[in-house]
Amino acid sequence: MFQLGKTIISEDILEKEFVCNLSACKGACCVDGDAGAPLIEAETKILEEIYPKVKPFLRKEGIEAIEAQGTWVKGTDGDLETPLIDNKDCAYVIFDGKTALCGIEQAYNQGIVDWKKPVSCHLYPIRVKDFTEFAAVNYDKWDICDDACSLGAALEVPVYKFVKEALIRRFGEDWYLELEKVAEEHKNS
């Protein structure tokens, strides 16, 4: 672990390798698990605001779940998250054949909304836990991502480089530039 500003960072994000392999996993992270995608408070307001524009991209089951539960929910642990369909799929998930995709991201890609998706989804496999004085930045190892780990290793792409855009979105460009310096020093030590 090391500290960078008000973040405590796991060295795994520098040492582990990862490149999402959607053709292998079929977007399993959007349909597996026992909770929705983690949200920060500001994102709950964004979801409420963009829902009418995103709704045409969603499946009937997703619309029903959102209209019954809301555009966001409080999970069993009290954390904010996206609603689920039958405690399984994220309500915002859509399918291209057998591959799960994000309906919000599809609306973003078509220029309908200017918000890509929850930052927690954009950051994956990094998970951020906010505390009063700092944020913990950790690598989340999940067996459904084994193919992403293999592809990352083959391409020699460390986690922090794979999620560069998302890290900048969450912590800013100056923070990321500092992280790159730390990564370089870590690599040469």
Image (cartoon, rainbow, N blue to C red):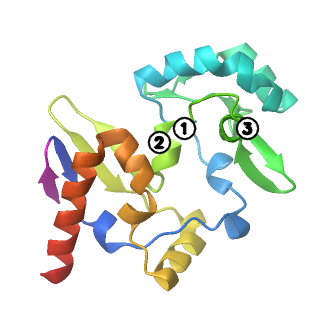
Q: Which residues are magenta?
A: 1-5
Q: Which residue is mark 3?
A: 110
Magenta-highlighted stretch: main secondary structure?
A: strand
| Label 1 with label 2: CB-CB less than 8 Å | yes
The nearer-to-camera label among 1 and 2 is 2
Residue 19 image position (x, y, % from top left): 53, 68
69 left or right of 1 in image: right
Measuring 57% from the left and 64% from the top, which residue is drawn there? 20
Which of pointers 1 and 3 indicates the residue nearer the eye?
3
- Tag 1: amino acid: Ala
- Label 3 SS: loop
Considering only order in the chain, which callout, 3 or 2, is on the residue closer to the N terminus? 3
User: Which residue does the image show at 74% across and 33% down from the upper left?
Assistant: 86
Q: Which residue is mark 2?
A: 120
Q: CA separation, marks 1 and 3?
A: 22 Å
Find out whether residue 3 is within the magenta segment. yes
In the displayed structure, would residue 189 be above or below residue 26?
A: below
Q: Position of residue 155 (x, y in %)?
A: 50, 81
Counting from the top left corner in percent of width and height, residue 152 is at: 49, 75
Which residue lies at the image location 55% right of the left edge and 78% below the top edge?
A: 151
What number is the disc on residue 37? 1
Viewer-proximal residue among 183 and 85: 183
